[in-house]
Amino acid sequence: MRENNEIWVFSEIHELCLELLAKGRQLGDSIGTEVAVIFPDMPSKNDNYFQSGADIVLSITNPILKTLQVDTYVDALASLANERKPELILIGATRSGLELAPRLAERLKTGYVAHAIKLEPDADKEFILIDKLSQGGTTIETLVSRTKPQIVTVARGVFSPTHSSRSGRVINVNPEIKSSTTKILKITNSSSTSTNYPLMVCIGHGIKSKEDITIVKRFAETIGAGVVYTRSVCEDFKLAKPELCLGFAGRKVNSKLCITVGVSGDSQTVAGFVNCRIILSINADPYARILSFSDYAVVCDLYGVLPKLTAAVNQLKLRR
Amino acid sequence: MRIECDQSEPREFRINGGDRDALEEAVLIREKYGGRVITMTMDGTHSQDILKETLAMGADEAVLLCDDSFVGGDEHAAVTVLSAAITKILDYDLIMCGAYSEDMYGFQIGPRIAEVCNLPQITYATRIAVEGRRVIAERDLEHETQTVETKLPCLITILPKLSEPRTPSLNNRTAALGKSIIVWDAADLSLSEDEVGFNGSLIDVLRSTKFSGNKKPVVFQGEEQEVISKIVDILRREGTLGKN
């Protein structure tokens, strides 16, 4: 039996946690390890974790961990990891996850890869091979850690949750944790919008003004699609909230159909929707890079086509 | 005070947005409270120009960490070098760096340094205030904004656009040309070859393939009405419009 006999999953975002569990389950079955979820926020969710692939819920009730703070969580995870020696730690690539994972890796002196897009066991089922995009998203690198546990962060939408009628066990653990060196004085919630639609529209920098975005959003609403944006729309033009930014470092979507509007197809952006089953791009440039990632490409003037398309869809809905 | 510029774009010779903003913020804090601003990067000697630029932007000193043995390492190996240099400086209060590099988006260097140097970390800062030995910062976690407080010394990572960086004046540029860059190698930092570069890494790159699309899309163009009806067909087939 291998020394490292667990794959761990941690994310403060429940949906992302379930996505990671699905991958953890698949890897666990392949290499013969159990899958454990760390620190569930609510015991009422335990069945949900088991049905999504967990064998074990490692439950901690220490009040210090009530708020997610990097130093206390690193203390807890590191102390548990030293004790239980997991094979692999999958962490959700939220901003909190992305500040926690490198610090944990440095504490455990082990290898960490950020923003994995694919995970599979090596031929001997000894280490997990990790694919990630690099060089501004133009290259896929396949990486492996020299040490264990291997630590990996994965963004929302890279893997899909699964469901089965499994059960599991809860293990109560009590690692030693020092209180945080940082005080949280105030928390203001930003409105968070779900991007978990079967149909997505991605708006790129071919769209230049707030009014033009309204046209695309109206179309998205008509067809029942969620809306995300490229980095330049969010950061350079400041026309959308950063949490709706799709891409390499931002959100990922894995919808059935993704319609890109005015997206040129730089690797940074493509990384965000490359897992969608069908990609339909609407773009004025017949030579845009997006075409090589598209199943269907509409080369047209957006402003001519989109309002008419919206009207056509509306009419179709009325007829039914 | 010192600031840390993680410069990980060896080909483009450009300071990351977050690093540039970190430098500007450090200069503003020095203007208010005194102290010294030191910029630092690990790279080949061609980074001298980048460091000169930081001097022109207001840094007091600039340190280049450069040694053949540093080449070819992962983030862990890089942080081993950066942390050794930070430790050598001793009397720092604040380490500031960009939240991410604009080619890698790893968000890794800051938290790793904080761990090695045993410092509190405030990541994704959008506003910083120093009051005596207290630091109060606003941080952007995407789904929420936090106001947090910790004590110096600490490490802060900065999101781009915290402050509008100054354009160096001609005087500053001229003065910067006269200043020399401090260069430290592995021996200066008492680092052995096993700790840095490829030998000191914890991650191996097995292979590297070009990420490009290979699809040949069905292209719709030409008569508008026809294009629209083709899109509607796809939406009916694949989307939420349902099939008649």
Image (tube, rainbow, N blue to C red):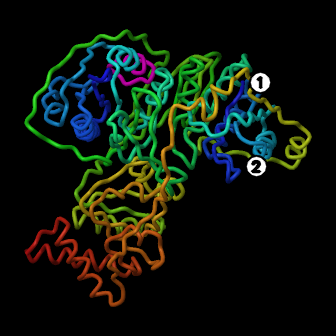
Secondary element at image label 1: loop
The magenta span reads A65-76
Q: Nearer the viewer, residue A155 or B197?
A: B197
The residue drawn where x is 38% and y is 51% is: A244
The residue drawn where x is 63% and y is 24% is: B130
Q: Nearer the viewer, residue A208 or A29?
A: A29
Residue at label 2? B167
Image quadrant where one finds the N terminus of chain B = top right
Image quadrant in which you'd find residue A14 = top left
Provide residue B44's location: percent of width, then percent of height: 74, 42
Image quadrant in which you'd find residue B178 = top right
Image quadrant in which you'd find residue A281 = bottom left
Please state which amino acid type lies under the numbered disc 1. Ala
Q: Is residue A93 above or below residue A300?
A: above
Dot label at residue A141: none
As drawn, is B196 to the left or to the right of A157? right
Camera-side mark, 1 or 2: 1
Q: CA distance from mark 1 to mark 2?
A: 36 Å
The residue drawn where x is 20% and y is 66% is: B239
Provide residue B147's location: percent of width, then percent of height: 48, 28
Please state which amino acid type lies under the numbered disc 2. Thr
| Nearer-N-terminus badge (1/2) | 2
Q: Is residue B91 magenta?
A: no
Q: Main secondary structure of the magenta part?
A: helix
Q: Is residue A69 magenta?
A: yes
Q: Is residue B185 above or below residue A221?
A: above
Q: Is residue A253 above or below residue B18?
A: below
Q: Nearer the viewer, residue B19 or B201?
A: B201
The residue drawn where x is 39% and y is 33% is: A188
As drawn, is B244 to the left or to the right of A38? left
Secondary element at image label 2: loop
Dot label at residue B187: 1
